[in-house]
Amino acid sequence: MTAHETADLLTIEFPELSADLHAPQNTNSVYRQLDCFAAFTRRAASEGRLEVLRHCFAVADSLLRRADHYLSAAIENVYLHCLHLDGSTYGNQLARQLMPVSLYQAYTRPHGNMLP
């Protein structure tokens, strides 16, 4: 799945992300697009919009299941890492209760340092 396909899929699911995902600095970068998607997901969590949060997780899970190695790594290293839900009991409960199983497994999998 290319960066354009990822942006288009996320825009279909979340039209309010269209401007961010298709901004010139983000158009060709799956990593930047997933960072925008993670910020949107964090806002849904902090605002208590649980149905939106559940939908975000479902879309992320769908992307992860259909992903090639590059997109899979981007989801695990950018989207899941940037959620910042794992610092609190509430965040852990949201992840455990609302994430599909395969996404939650990726979320809880230990990740090495992303720096070289």
Image (cartoon, rainbow, N blue to C red):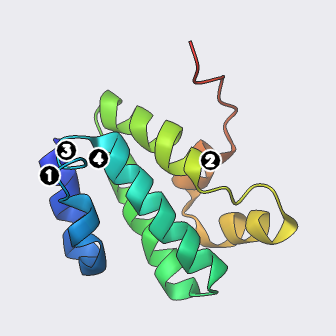
Dot 1 amino acid type: Glu
Marks 2, 1: nearer the viewer = 1
Residue 3 in the figure: left or right of residue 59: left
Q: Earlier in the sequence, mark 3 or mark 4?
A: 3
Residue at position x 66%, y 23% in the image: 112
60 over 19 or under it: above or below:
above
Q: Nearer the viewer, residue 33 or 106?
A: 33
How many residues crowd around disc 3 within 10 Å: few (fewer than 14), some, or many (20 or more)?
Answer: some
Residues tagged 1 and 4 counted as in contact (Cβ below 8 A): no
| Mark 2 vs mark 4, CA separation in Å | 17 Å
Instruction: Give the SS element for disc 2.
Output: helix
| Mark 1 vs mark 3, CA separation in Å | 5 Å
How many residues crowd around disc 2 within 10 Å: few (fewer than 14), some, or many (20 or more)?
Answer: many
Marks 3, 2: nearer the viewer = 3
The quarter of the displayed image where residue 15 is located = bottom left
Instruction: Give the SS element for disc 4.
Output: helix
The quarter of the displayed image where residue 100 is located = bottom right
Q: Earlier in the sequence, mark 1 or mark 4?
A: 1
How many residues crowd around disc 1 within 10 Å: few (fewer than 14), some, or many (20 or more)?
Answer: few
| Mark 3 vs mark 4, CA separation in Å | 14 Å
Name the residue that disc number 1 marks: 5
Name the residue that disc number 2 marks: 107
In percent of width and height, residue 77 lies at 51, 37
Name the residue that disc number 3 marks: 3
23 over 57 or under it: above or below:
above
| Mark 3 vs mark 2, CA separation in Å | 22 Å
Marks 1, 4: nearer the viewer = 1
In percent of width and height, residue 41 lies at 50, 69
Q: Earlier in the sequence, mark 3 or mark 2?
A: 3
Dot 2 amino acid type: Tyr
The quarter of the displayed image where residue 44 is located = bottom right
Q: Earlier in the sequence, mark 2 or mark 4?
A: 4
